[in-house]
Image (cartoon, rainbow, N blue to C red):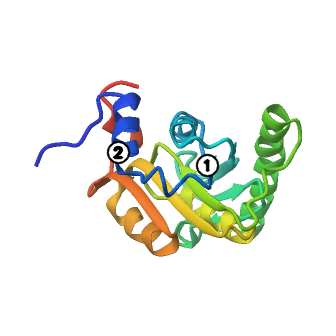
Amino acid sequence: MKLKKFKNRQEALEKLLSIIDINAIDDMLVISISENGNFYAREIAMRGGLLEGDFLFIEEIKSPENKETSLAAISETKDYILIDELINAFEITDDYVFSEAERVYEEKILQNIYKFRGGESIISLQNRNVLLVDEGANTGLTLLCAIKSCISKNAASINVALPVIAKETAKIIEKLVDNTYFVYEIEDFVDTDFYFKEK
């Protein structure tokens, strides 16, 4: 089977746009959930003639044992997702996870809110059709946290667009949201950068 790779971000964007129904998203609020997602979110919004968009700040909480391993994620709306299997396997206390979540929120998320929005909270999601955009998803931790934030902020519908996603993660996400736009669903996902010949 041929390995699925994009030449670059521009090709990934064009392929993503080709599967998105632009007419269906003309009343959507486009929300980027990572720095890499900004490129796609901006272009999708512009092609769809949308004027409104924003960035939902999300940070992952790492294991004290291994800084490469994420145990949880917290969003600027203070919604969080925990990976209980890892937390239990590493015998990490709830105290550690929640104090680390608070630290990450104050040191990283609040800093970004002030830096990029002058301290303003995210645009209202209440009764809005939201399109969450990122470049890729492996475990889906950030994406799940973003979906939870949209639910807690009473979004009317939640839609997700990514060029590349792990197949198992795609199955989970499809059950939780209204529409998904995935160019490639990968069986044995490596990491997002792996699927781009050049970045």
Q: Secondary structure at mark 1?
A: strand
Q: How many marks?
A: 2
The residue at which mark 2 appears reads as 18
Between 179 and 3, which is closer to the camera in this rendering? 179
Position of 136 with respect to 166 (left or right) is right
**First in residue order: circle 2 vs circle 1:** 2
The local secondary structure at tag 2 comes to helix
Amino acid found under the numbered disc labelled 1: Val
Q: Nearer the viewer, residue 168 or 150?
A: 150
Q: Give the distance between the C-alpha atoms of the residues marked 2 and 1, in whole angstroms.
A: 17 Å
Q: Residue at x 75, y 55 (%)?
A: 100
x and y, in percent, of residue 70 in the image: 56, 54
108, 31: nearer the viewer: 31
Which quadrant of the structure image shows residue 129? bottom right
Residue 92 in sight from this viewpoint: no
Tell me where residue 108 sits by quadrant. Answer: top right
Q: Where is residue 121 shown, x and y percent of the image?
A: 84, 49
Near mark 2 (Cα within 10 A), the count class, few <14, some 14-19 or many ≥20, is: few
Q: Quadrant of residue 10?
A: top left
Label 2 is placed on what type of residue? Ser
User: Residue shown at 53%/33% (left/top)?
Assistant: 39
The residue that label 1 is drawn on is 30
Q: Position of residue 138 (x, y in %)?
A: 42, 53
Left or right of 185 on screen, residue 106: right
